[in-house]
Amino acid sequence: MQNVVLITGGSRGIGAATARLLGQRNYTVIINYKQNHQAAQSVANSIITSGGKAYVVQTDITDEQAVVTMFDKIKADIGMVTHLVNNAGVLSTQTRVEHMSAERINKMLTHNVTPYFICAREAIKHMRLSANPSQCAIVNVSSAASYLGGANEYVDYAAAKGAIDSFTKGLSLELAAEQIRVNGVRPGCIYTDIHADGGEPQRVDRLASALPLKRGGTAEEVANAIAWLLSNEASFTTGGFIDLAGGK
Ligand code: NAP
């Protein structure tokens, strides 16, 4: 069976590290991105240069019709998606709940929750049409914020990630009889660009010494867990989570 993995937000950070790793492991890698074509193409080029297969696809995953079109195009041009990494996510600037508008809270849900559902919905259709649905898997990138709460920074984002944990559990049970596995990873403080979106590019350095492991994590460390959960080595694991949060 050809393993075809779609990674939303595969152009930077955790998604890019996952794309590079899976590119070395015999997956055809589809790198989704929203606006930074150069970053996405650079990840694809590094995979291709190392002998792997990679494609880039620009789609804003908050646009339901665009997501449907993306999956149709993948089916026509490459084949069925057999593995999905729901990864693309956004932060808003740090603030307390008492200062949050409905617009901001809704943005956290429409950007971090709904697209995971829609991408999974479309991926499941592909998986059922693939050569071996029981070898297919989904990994949802949640966050340690889902259980830590994000107090004084972004409780709205944390709550959105809490929704992803519930989604992961529920979807895993809906698909278990078909042997399609659904798991989650919950990264903590990882060195990526997302913290600049939260208004504090150096956030990981500020918090690192307070973590039990006394350091921030890397995107590659998260990618290793995602790759394991996608693989047959994790064949008896569904509805589970791997926390990559330095002991928090
Ligand atoms: P990042 O470095 O900021 O990268 C975000 C990626 O998502 C980029 O490839 C971006 O593409 C893409 N993206 C954003 N909105 C999109 C949209 N609407 N449609 C398609 N692509 C979109 O983020 P990251 O830190 O790697 O985070 C990845 C995931 O890990 C997120 O779900 C995040 O919540 C979670 N996470 C991160 C940390 C951490 O400390 N870094 C901790 C816990 C959880 P463009 O560049 O083209 O916009």
Image (cartoon, rainbow, N blue to C red):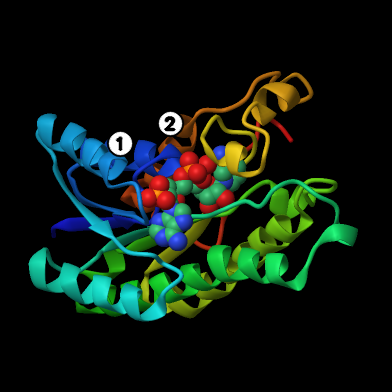
Residue linked to disc 2:
220
Residue 67 higher or lower than 209, as above or below: below
Whole-percent x, y for residue 152 in the image: 85, 46
As helix, strand or loop, the secondary structure at mark 1 comes to helix
Residue 86 visible at all: no
Under 8 Å from ligand 1: the CB of mark 2? no
- From the viewer's perspective, is 29 left or right of 13? left
Q: Which mark is residue 192?
A: none
The image shows residue 115, relative to residue 158, as above or below, that is below
Assess disc 2: are there few (<14), some (14-19) or many (≥20) residues with their C-alpha within 10 Å of its C-alpha: some
Q: Position of residue 230 (x, y in %)?
A: 37, 52
What crowding class fits label 1: few (fewer than 14 Cα within 10 Å), some (14-19), or many (20 or more)? some
| Residue 10: percent from left, percent from top | 35, 48
Q: Which residue is mark 1?
A: 21
**Residue 232 on image: x %, y %:** 32, 51
Q: Are marks 1 and 2 in contact (CB under 8 Å)?
A: yes
> Is residue 178 positioned above or below 46 on the image?
below
Q: Is residue 67 left or right of residue 243?
A: left
Q: Residue at x 74, y 35 (%)?
A: 248
Quadrant location of the N terminus in the rendered image: bottom left
Disc 1 within 8 angstroms of ligand 1 (CB): no
Q: Amino acid at mark 1?
A: Leu
Foreground residue among 77 and 36 = 36
Tell whether 177 sits left or right of 2: right
User: Mark 1 or 2 closer to N-term?
Assistant: 1
Distance between mark 1 and mark 2 Cα atoms: 8 Å
Q: Is residue 71 left or right of residue 234?
A: left
Q: Single out the residue that lies furthest toward the right.
A: 98
Residue 76: quarter of image: bottom left
